[in-house]
Every structure is written in structure tokens, then in C-alpha cells.
Image (cartoon, rainbow, N blue to C red):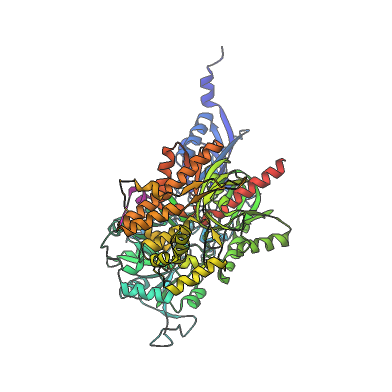
Amino acid sequence: MSKTPEHNLEHAIERKSIRVQGVVQGVGFRPFVYRLVAEEGLAGLIGNDTDGVIIELEGPERRIKAFLARLAAETPPLARIDSVATADLTPTGETTFRIVASEILGQVGTGIPADAAICPDCLRELFDPTDRHYRYPFLNCTNCGPRFTITRRIPYDRPQTSMAMFPMCPECQAEYDDPLNRRFHAQPNACWRCGPQVWLESGVPTNRSSFVGWKSPDGVRIEPSDPIAETIERLLRGDILAIKGIGGFHLAVDAMSEEAVTRLRERKHRYGKPLAIMVRDLAAARSLCDLSAEEETLLKTPACPIVLARARQGNGVAPSVAPGIPWLGVFLPYAPLQHLLFADPRVKALVMTSANLSEEPIAIDNDEARARLGNIADAFLMHNRKILQRCDDSVAAVVDGAPQLIRRARGFVPLGIPLPLDAPPLLAVGGHLKNVFSLARGKFVYQSQHLGDLENLTGQQFFEESLCHLMHTFEIEPTAVAHDLHPGYLSTNWAKQWAGTRGLRFIAVQHHHAHIAANMAEHGLQGPVIGLSLDGTGYGTDGRIWGGEVLICHLDCFERFAHLDYTPMPGGEAAIHEPWRMAFAYLVAAGFSEGEATELVGASDQEARVVSRMIDRGINTPYTSSLGRLFDAVAAVVLNRRWVDYEAQAAIGLEGIAVDESDRIRRREYAPQLYACGRLGEANVLRLDDLWRSIVEDIRRGVPKQRIAERFHSGIAEGFIRAAANARESTGISQLALSGGCMHNRRLARYLRSGLEKEGFQVYQHRNVSPGDGGLSYGQAAVAAAILYKDISR
Ligand SMILES: [Zn+2]
Ligand SMILES: [Zn+2]
């Protein structure tokens, strides 16, 4: 008899190659593997290449199995494993474990890590007087620090980053070379002796009474003993400081000083739009906002996004930080430099807003900052580590119990987002405002950082600069370009031109189809689904402006089942900034006389006459089915808000005042009513007459505006739930995707999801991709991939 197989297995030596893909470079993955290998008593090698990490392990089968289980279970905080593929090799008798050099080989399938907030270990060292990193503003390790914003291309190694110009001192080098050290291959590793430094710059105003700029373009370097201490003093006395950060400059002022905040707004030409506030820690955030457990978790993630949370009454924050809305955008310090500012107990809360003029891209370069911010900032806290990629702070909110990204930038870019099907290399250019583009290849989409509006020249330059960088980084050479159906978008024209000169195919994708496709792709769905695309504006297949849509969607095509009734939009774009115009149009369409409508919207007779004439003659008056415009219009009437500083301002105000009401009787009367169109092949219509009659009736009866706002939200939800139920009756589809900019509205999202689930729908909400225009290019990429896939398999 032979010996038991068990005994043989115990000692059977195997060699396996293990290929790991995902975010596995520059995130402490190799030291982690090194430690596991040592603990399991294995031998072999590990190396980075452009496909990710390759490991070869030799040892008992049982040990290799244990290693693989621990690899998945104990992944370091910033790493993300997308796939692990193993293959058998012949054992070589190796007894040690080696780390082999990075090779530049093959196609790029790995992610550059995103920037991450300082980790607890580094934070401890920052304030430890006995540590050699004490108060060093640029300390970091493999678990934290800048990544994307300092990287030129992959593989992510020091020579490919802006740290290349800082040779490490012997102590840093020793940490970097030690596989068991937290700073093993931490590419931005640095200290007081060898790394970047900060300094403070000021200038002499060329005109004493009205500040118009610096005398010298280089600024005047101030030499205080401690530039950070001096920065704090200046902030506390109300100065505006430009502070160089991770993804760009911030403009900072004391958030408790109304005078300072007002001055910042005036100099920045930013009126109305809320400003983000940075606070020391979670306790400080709690003192300004009522935070849910989910919101606290979101604040503390390594991406450190700005979180929109409900402001506490009497929190002491200057009123002009977020005028007219009940939310505050708060975030925690993520760079060591920011922690040093908050180490002074007198610093309570700082407005930290992207350093730019209105919607221009954030400034990153020192000279660029001096030139562009000279008229805004009183002084500059500079440093000499180059920012290679502009990246604003990300913005997130907890919507209906789960986090949702409103602006995907620092901390998230350029992590790949999975696609449910294989894409050829392609580019999707996104929308018009709040632009984000996407590059796709294989099963992943790489979204750019938030680029802002393309309307100005710098916006377009930023677009091209980022595209060039991401194409280069991921080595993606697009074979097709997806764009919005709107013929007037700059991104559309740009896409056609770009695709034209390269002889590429271009694919037009309808705006609201792209929104739903983004949701579907995020959840791995290929359809069919019922899609509620509730949005501001998007160009429809009939040339009208859509935005309150019930669609039947596949990834590659869609049908329109129903939409909000078309209403004139007097003055086009102007109706967005003057929502009373929309309200006037809705009221007249609902059967109110022009006199009544004029009074209800608070317009002068002269104004009403002009708008009325525009509607009658169709002058510059497109038709829209937009839910966003309906929100604006209702807000205009209920809140007497005739003008807004930015899109959706009035609607946000309406959401903000709505109160929970147990009595939902009025809900049915407020709900838009579904009417069959009657014509074959045309979508059903959700009519708004009852809604407007109910609102006006409630206003005249003196019902508090808080309750009218609530009834409006629940009525809208009710109308769309009924329309969805109707769509299910005629199609049998019960999977439902929610998307579009209106899904940022928490109350609406909650009512829709709970109501639809009660009706038996399986409801999908956005999680990693924005429901607004920030998610558009991801949806375009999914649609284009599905169309191209179909063409190939045909
Ligand atoms: Zn760290
Ligand atoms: Zn050093």
C-alpha cells in the first residue's frame, strides 16, 4: 500500500503564477504580498508591469491556497483587486522571495491609484515632535498621499511623477527600499531634508484704494520664520489666501467672517453658488451640520469628498457661504498641510473653494496662480511640488440612504468603472456644462476628472489637456467617438471634428438614453429596463428639449413611453435664469388667464406682455418636457423667486423647505395625469393642469409653502410611479432605473424608490456614477460599446 495521499499533499511543492489586476500599484500592494509570503513561508517573486502585478509562488499547495484566500480578505485600504488569474508552472526549487523591477510591457490594464487623504499613521507622525517627519507638510506613505495628480504616465514609479526632481535622502531611500516598511516604494516619499517645501508670497498692491494686482509677476517672497503660522494669522484677520493643495489651488478665508466671505465672492465674481467649508475633524463637522451615520462615513473615506449635509441652525457660519439653501458642503483636511492649518485651535472653519474665476478650471501652476489669482488673493501659500493634473475636490451626498457622487474628481479619478460588455477603445465626450469625458477599453471606463463648463477657452484647453494625458496614461487610442445628440454642443462639434480628422466613426447618443444607460451599466444590466430620466435639459430625437422622460431602454437603443407635457420655454436659456418665465408659460398652459399668471409669478405687465408675445409667435421659444424646468417654475411661484444665480438654485430651495407630512391626500391631485396620445408610435403625455390648479388653490387658501413643497414632491413621484406601472403593463418589464439631474433631489429620490418598490418594481439608483451630467459620458460609452458590439457580432 502506498502512503496516504494526505501526507503527500502536505509536502507536494507547487509553483503558480498569479496575475492580479486592479488598483495594485502604488498602494502598498507589494509590501502586503511580501508580508503574506513571509508569513506563509513561500518563495518566488513579484513584479509590477503595465498589466498590474505578477506573482510567482513556490511552496506547499495548502500554503499557496491560504495565501490566495488572505490576498482577497486582507487587501490594503487603497488597493482594489478586479481579477486574480492563476496558472501552473514547474517548480524551480527557489527558496527566497524577490521583488523584480517594473517592466514597461504590453497593454495598460492597470489603474493609476487615485489621490488619498493622509492615513492615521502619517497623521500621528505629523504631530509627533520626536519623529523626523514632525510638521513636514508633504509626508505620505503607501497608504496615503497624492497619486493621479502628480503622475505623468504609468507604470506609477517615481521617475514618472513630479517627485522625480527630489532625490531621496539616505533615510527616505532606506524606507523606500525596505519591503517591510510602510514607505516601501511609496513614490512621493519625502522629508524636510529632501522633499518639497512651502513658502508664503505676497505682493504690493499697485493701487492702494482698489486692489488691482501685484507689482511683480513673481510676487514678493515673505520670509517669516514659519510660513504656516503666518498664513494662519492672515486668515484670522480676514485675508484671502491662495493655498496650493493636491489637485490645484484653493482660495481660503475664515468661514465665520461674513466680511471675509463677502469680499471673496466679490473678487471671485461668484454670487449665489454655495462655497465649501473645511473643518478640523468630525466633531467640528457635527457642530456645523446634522450628520447621519452614512454622511460621517462618507466624510472619512480616503477620497475625502465635500459632503452636502443639512446645516445646523445658529452654527455661526457666515450667511453668505450658502445663501438661501439649508445645506452646507463640508469636508475634512486631507493634505498634511491642511492639518497643520487646523492644528491652531483658533482656526474653526475655512471656506476652501477652487481657485478660479467663476467656471474656469482650477489653477495648478505657481506662475499661473500668480497671474490668474493676483486680483483675488492677498497672499499665496506656495510649494514646489508640481501638480501635473488639475483635479477639483469631489462632491458627494447621501441620497436615499446611500452615497452618491455629484462631482467625481480628486480621490476617485482615474479609477476604472466596470462595463457590462467588452468595449473597443473609444472616447465619449459627455455633455456641455459640468463636462466629464470617458475613455473605454475592454471591460472598463476611465472617466476624466470634472472639467467644468466648456463654454470658455480655458475650459476647452483643460478638456484637451486632460484627454491627451488620459489617452497617454492608459494607452487608449480611440476607434470611435460617442457624443450627445445636441448639434449645438461644443463637445459635439469638437467630437465630429476630432473623429473626422482621424477617420473615426462617431456615434450620437440621446441625452436621456445616456443617463439611463449609465445607471444600467453601473449595475451590469443590458436591458430592457424602464428608465425614469428626470433631468434639466437634453436634446430629443424630435428636436425638442426633453427632461421628464419614461423610456424603455436597452443599452443600444430605446423607446419613449411617456413624457411631461411640452411647455413653451420663453427665451430658451433665459428661462433657466428667470424661472418666472417658465412659471408664466405653465400657468397659461394650465388654463389660467394672463392676468392671473402675471400676478402669480410677480411679473410686471410689461414683462408679461413680452413673454406672452414670445410664446404666441414662437420667438426664441423652444418646447420642453423638462422636470428640472417644472421644479424651477414651481419654486418661482411658491418661493417668489423670480431670478436665480445658477441652474437649479430655486429647485434646491424648494427641496430644502419641504417638510414631512403624514397626510398624503393631496398627493393624487398634485400628480401629473397620464394621457394616451392616441397617435400610433407616439409617446403618452403626463399633463400638468391639475398640478398647477392644486398649487394655486393651496396658495390662495394660505397653505404654508413648506407643505406645498412637500405635496409637489410627492405628487411628481406619484405621477411617474403611475406612468411606470403603465409601462410595465404594456411591456412586462419590472426592472426600473432612475437617472437624470433631478435624482440629486433626496426627497424625490426617496419617494420614487419607496413608491416604486411598493408597486413591486426592482429599482436601481446610481451609486458610483453621477445621475447628473457628470455621468453622461459613462452612459454614452456604454451605449456606443453596445452598438459596436452588435455590429461586430452581426
Ligand atoms: Zn500614510
Ligand atoms: Zn528625505
Coordinates of residue 422 in the picture (x, y in percent): 63, 44
Regarding residue 245, the answer to whether it shows in the image is no
Q: Quadrant of residue 607?
A: bottom left
Q: Where is residue 500 drawn, in percent x and y?
A: 72, 61
Identify the residue at horizontal 25%, vertical 63% (top origin). Answer: 314
Residue at x 49%, y 46% (from the top left corner):
674
Quadrant hosting residue 20 = top right
Q: Is residue 572 above or below residue 18?
A: below
741 up-or-down from 98: above or below: below
Tell me the quarter of the image containing the C terminus: top right
Residue at screen point 35% across, 66% down: 323
In this rendering, would 550 be left or right of 699? right
Q: Looking at this view, is 551 or 208 the one in front?
A: 551
- Magenta stretch, residue numbers: 289-298
Quarter occupied by residue 472? bottom right
Residue located farthest toward the left when viewing the structure as drawn: 314
Label tally: 0
